[in-house]
Structures are given as structure tokens and as C-alpha cells.
Amino acid sequence: MAVLNEEQTMLRDMVREWSDNESPVTAFRKMRAAAPAEGYDPAAWQALSEMGVAGIVIPEAFGGTAFGYLSLGLVLEQLGRNLAASPLAATSAAASAIVLGESETAKAAWLPRIASGEVVATLAVDEGPVHDPAKIATKVVDGRLSGTKAFVAEGDSAGVFVVAAEDGLYLVAGDVGVTRSPRHMTDSRSHAQVTFADAPAERLGDIGLTARVVDRATAAVCAEMLGLAEQAFTTTNDYLKTRVQFGQVLSTFQALQHRMAKMFTELELMRSVVEGALEAIDAGRSDVDQAVSLAKAVAGDTLHLVSREMIQLHGGIGMTDEHDAGFYIKRARILETMWGNAAFHRERFARLNGY
Amino acid sequence: MATAPELDAPVTALDEFRQTARAWLAANFPSALKGKDNALSALEGPTDLSAEEIAWKTAMGEKGWGVPGWPKAYGGGGLDKAEIRILQEEMARIGAWNPIGGMGVMMFGPTLLEYGSEAQKHEHIPAIAKGEVRWCQGYSEPNAGSDLANVQTFAEDAGDHYIVNGQKTWTSGGQWADKCFALVRTDKSQKHGGISFLLIDMTAPGVEVKPIRMISGQSPFCETFFTNVKVPKENLVGREGQGWEIGTRLLQHERNSLSGGGGASRLFAGKALGALAKDYRGADEHGRVPDSDLRMRIVRHEMDSRAFALTLRRAALEAKSNQGPSAATSIMKNVGARITQERAELSIEIMGMAGLGWEGEGFSEDELTQTRTWLWGKAVSIYGGSTEIQNNVISKRILGMLDHQ
């Protein structure tokens, strides 16, 4: 665990307590059954916003707390543990684009409304089912943006889109020229295909900004993955200590003990690389790209392992919809895929290191 | 796939059989059903059959060729191994498939032929051979999963019948079944030796089933509750206390069908991963899958699959050459499960977000099927003896390793 300051410790504990009491996995189960159009529970998002989490990466001058990315990660990790459905990761990614971008009018117009939780924002980059920032066909002509974005997280409810075009990032607000089409995926969260047809767009920056913002979005996803992996592991460990077969609790079998020890080992490594990426962003280091690729590759492999073992070690009960294991593996694969899977980031890491 | 030689005049009895089979299939298999076997029917339940499907099922049922190796006296085909192989080749040649299946054919029938009384065989086998009666398996209980011998469902002796009370779980197809073969306890004083193999009518008063929804969205299993269910003593297979022996013999049939040509290979069906990768990821200027990391993992998987296929072949040849059962058979279930699951994981990885659709617009039928296949495939390493239990069998029975002292 990274060394936290007092502010960060309080933030983590507050969100952890809220998540465990107000937004346990049973809340996600209810949300899935109710299937709200937003893909999350608006009341829960309201409560989180009142705690100030929507403005964590937004400067104080625009109504945020400017706590930074490690703090954002602490919150997403706690929410991820219980699969809390919230638009925090997407909103923060879009907010980072506005903060880092060149438009002062966009900052003044949107950052305070995002920080208060009033407006949900999102980042729309990919145009196909596999992350590929090199394949962007979206164009802006005379301040009007046209293109189709695939599987946009929180695309169903977003009031502000930060959109990647061929030549950089743009902000599209409102519904003029915007068509959303929901995509129902394994994780029961919001993903939408969003088509822009001559939508009024404001320029935020060049493709260098796109890359910096995608790195921040990726680091945020890694933090959620850490929360999922930790809880999947803990739930499994608890189960092995209670399930009896052959007259013994399963946790007495050495073969199973070693599998848990292996996962524990991988989780420790995962925590280091995820926190490392978040800290690199906060420190403004020049190798954020490498740190993020390292984090996403390790996080992808580790969450993949833990989510599979969660089902296998629970046996039949883990295969039932009544149990939580299915929720974890279904969300895990979505997060593994978002912003490039482990293979994508291994390749990127190799390129960044010149081999 | 084996191809049949062109036929001239019959020279041997087998050639003659091939001609007979070919003519019969030509006359009876409706060509509209070519390749229309429903591989997911075991998960999604029976569907209404078309007139052609009914005709095909009836013809195969009456001929006994749905269970070609079973004795004619009980409605089987009475064919020997060479004839069965020829029948399979001839069916494959025209895209015909076997309409008679299920647990009765794969597991219960072979076991009853071995252990059942004459009366039991005449009562149950012909109906299975015709596909008229659907059987389900009443084995697992909430506290008897891997530790199956811990079954607690109790059959109390009540003179000419038993009174059965207890709960089963993972009853495959319980909500669609007519009858159940169950492991029940007739003696509480001993663990394995207190188990009996009992046939229970699923329509009897006191039988209640509750489908279990799985993570893949399907409900192929049930919880089954028995409350004071009256079961005639004629329905005991073997003798009291012989249930563990009979039940584990049945599991051998189950594992053979899971690791060999049955359940697992159905999950292999579909496009080769290399081709799937090119569909979703394109190709570089040399025609290679551009993601080299993914490409190497696809290769690793394909090679694993080839090694498995060669192992299945080697084991079959060794068995045939009277060397006795090959030790290689002990690895089949685990390797089959590994390949099935790896294939599904690689498929959804190749497809990216398109491989994670749940329902609704924006996804093709194939994509949605892939998602469900991936999730369902997680059960393969759990059911029919989990990977861990199979590894215990290998380490204890094959390698002679000792229990923890």
C-alpha cells in the first residue's frame, strides 16, 4: 500500500465505509434487476458526489479538490471491491482532458458542474471492439465533429463527451448531432455506441493530449481492477475456510493453499504497479506511458487469474447466478479489454523501450 | 473426418453393411436436417420438433441405430465396433446426426445394461433407445459435491417400497426429465457401503424441482427436493449398499463422454481461432495476425489441441491393441476442460468488446453465443469430477502418491 497522507487515508476510509454499508454487491444486484437507463443508481452517484469524489482530479479553482490520481485510485478501488456501478472513472477521464486541455471556456463552463456531480462526462476514443488509438476516423470540419464511437462507457447518460478525432481531442456537449444506442454487455453497466453527425465541437488539444488522457483513463480502470481482484480473492479465501468436503474445511488442503499463496503474490505485485502508475501521473513524471502500460498488463493478467480461480475454487456454487463470482468475472473481462488488454500493453511497453 | 471409399461390388460383410447403411440413411435421413443438430439443446432444454425431426428420430429409434452398440433384444442396433464406425462414417458423409441422446444414452443405459435385472432392462432400455424417456442424474447434494459419498438423501425401508427424503442439486435437466437415477442412503452406519442406486419417477408425489440460473443465463440444472416420495423396491438397481460401485461405474461413462467425442468436442465447434483473429483483427502485409502476443498464444492453444487429439487417438489405439486401458485416459478430462476454456477465453479476447455482449442490438448471434459459451465453459472443470479431483486420481492411483500422514 502506498504511503498515504492524512487526507487520503480519510478519503479511503470514508469511501470504504460507504461502499460496504450503502453499496455492497447486493446493491449492484438490485441495480442489474432494475436496469436503469443510466446503467448506475443515480441516488448512489449523488451520495458519492456529495463526498466530493467527482472533483478529485479537478483544481480547487473550478470546484474540485485536486487530490490527484492516487486518491482517485483509492476511491475506484473501494468501489471496485463491491462492484459499485458509478460513472466516476469515465467522468474523471473526461475531466482530466478538460483540465489538461487548452480551452479556458470549457474549463469554466464544465469543470464546476462535473465536480459537483451534476453532469456526467465520458471519454470516447475507440471506433471498434478492440482498443486501437491509431485507428480513428472521426473528423472535425469547421467546428463540427462527425464519427461513430463504439462501446463508450457511460455513453447512455453522459452530458459531455470528450471525443478523439484524427487530429486531437474535442469536447461535445448536449444532444445536438448526437445519437446514442445502448449496448447490453456482460457487466450490466452502461456502454453505448455514440454517433456524432456534425455535432458542435470545441477543441481541447492535439493527439499528444489524447494519449495523455487515455493513460489517465487507463490508470483509473487499473484501480477499479485492483479492487475487483482483491475482493474476488478475499471472498474465495473466506469460502475455503468454511466449505467442508471429505470431513475437512477446504483450506486445509495444501494444493489449494498454494494456489491462494500464488494469487496473493500476484496481487501484491499488481498493487505496486497500479499505485506506481497513479503516483507517476501525480508526480508529472515523463514515463507515465510506460508506468501505465506496466500497470494495465500486470493488472489484466492478475485479474484474469483471480476471476477464473474464484469460480473454480467455489465449485458449482460459483457457477450460479445467485452467487457473486459471475459478476466479478463478467466485469473483469470488460475492464481487461478497455483501453487495451494485457497483450496490447505488453506490445506498447516494448515499443516505448525501443525493442 | 474419415471418407468412405467408393463402392463396387460387396467383397466383405463390412462392405455389405456399408451399402445397407448408406441405402437406409439415404431413404430415411431428411436432407433438410443436414448439419442442423442443436448443440446447445442440453443447456437450453427441449424444443418443439419439426415433422422432419420427428420422422428422423422415429426411424433411428425403431432401427436401434441411436444406440448402435446396445443389444437388439433391448431395442439397440446390435452392431459391432467396426459396423458402428462405418455407420458413423456414412452419417458424417451426408451430414446426418444422431437424434437419440441425453443422459439415458450416455450414462444410465450402459450402466443399467451392466447392473440391471432383466425386468429393469426390458422396462427402461427400449424407451431410451427410442428417445421416449428423458433421464436425469440425482447425485450431488449441497454437502456432497466433490465428496460425493457424503450423500444424505435417505431411502427408508417401508416393506415393498422405500420412502425417500432429501435434497439433490445440479440435477441436469431435472425440469425436463421423466425419471431420475439417484444415489441414496439406505444405511446411515457406513459411508460408501450405505449408498444404493435407486430409480425415481420425477412425476411421483413429493418430487419438486427448482431450476438454478447459471452465470451464463441458462438453467440446465435444478435443485430437486424429495419429500416422502414412495419408490417401489423393484426400482433398486443391484443390491442395497451397491450404489457406490454402480454410481462410480456410471461416472466412468460420464467422463468418457465428457473428454472424448461428447460434450467437450461440441464446444470445440466453430471457426478456427486463426481465422477468427483475422476476421476481428485483420492481417499484416505477410498475412499474419498483427498482435504477435495474441498470435503466439493462439499457436500455443492450437498445438495443445493437436496434442490432445493425438493423445485421444493413441489411447484408442492402445485400448484396441489389448494393452489394457491406457494411463493417458486419466488426463483426458482435465486436458479437455483446459482446451475448452482456453479456446473460449482466446475467442472473447480476439473479439474484444464484441465478445462480451449479453443481449440486444449491436451483436451478431455468433457473438452472443460466444459470450454464453465462454461463461458456461467454466463449468467443464467443475462438473463430472473437478480438475482437482482428477488430479487426485492421477497422483494417487496412477503415480502411487500417499495421503497426508
Image: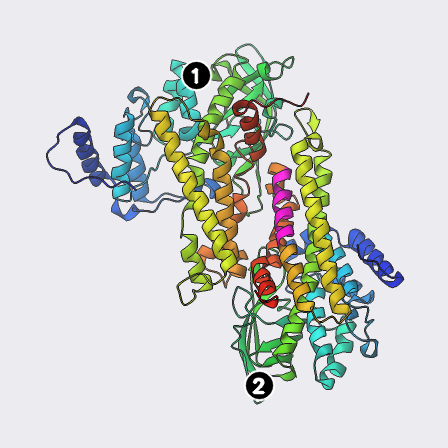
Secondary structure, mark 1, is: helix
Q: Amino acid under label 2?
A: Arg
Secondary structure, mark 2, is: strand
Say whether residue B135 is left or right of residue B382: left
Picture quadrant where residue B163 is located: top right
Magenta segment's dominant SS is helix
The location of residue A186, given as percent across then percent down, is 58, 55
Vertical relation: B9 (above or below) A309 = above
Q: Amino acid under label 1?
A: Tyr
Which residue is label 1 attached to? B115
Residue name at image x 50 percent, y 49 percent: B344
Label 2 neighbourhood size at 10 Å, few (<14), some (14-19), many (20+)? some
Residue name at image x 87 percent, y 63 percent: A7
Magenta stretch in the rendered image: A301-314
Q: Are marks 1 and 2 in contact (CB under 8 Å)?
A: no
| Cα–Cα span, label 1 and label 2 | 78 Å
Residue A197 visible to an observer of this rendering: no
Indicate the chain on which mark 2 is placed. A
Residue A40 visible to an observer of this rendering: yes
Picture quadrant where residue A149 is located: bottom right
Which residue is label 2 attached to? A144
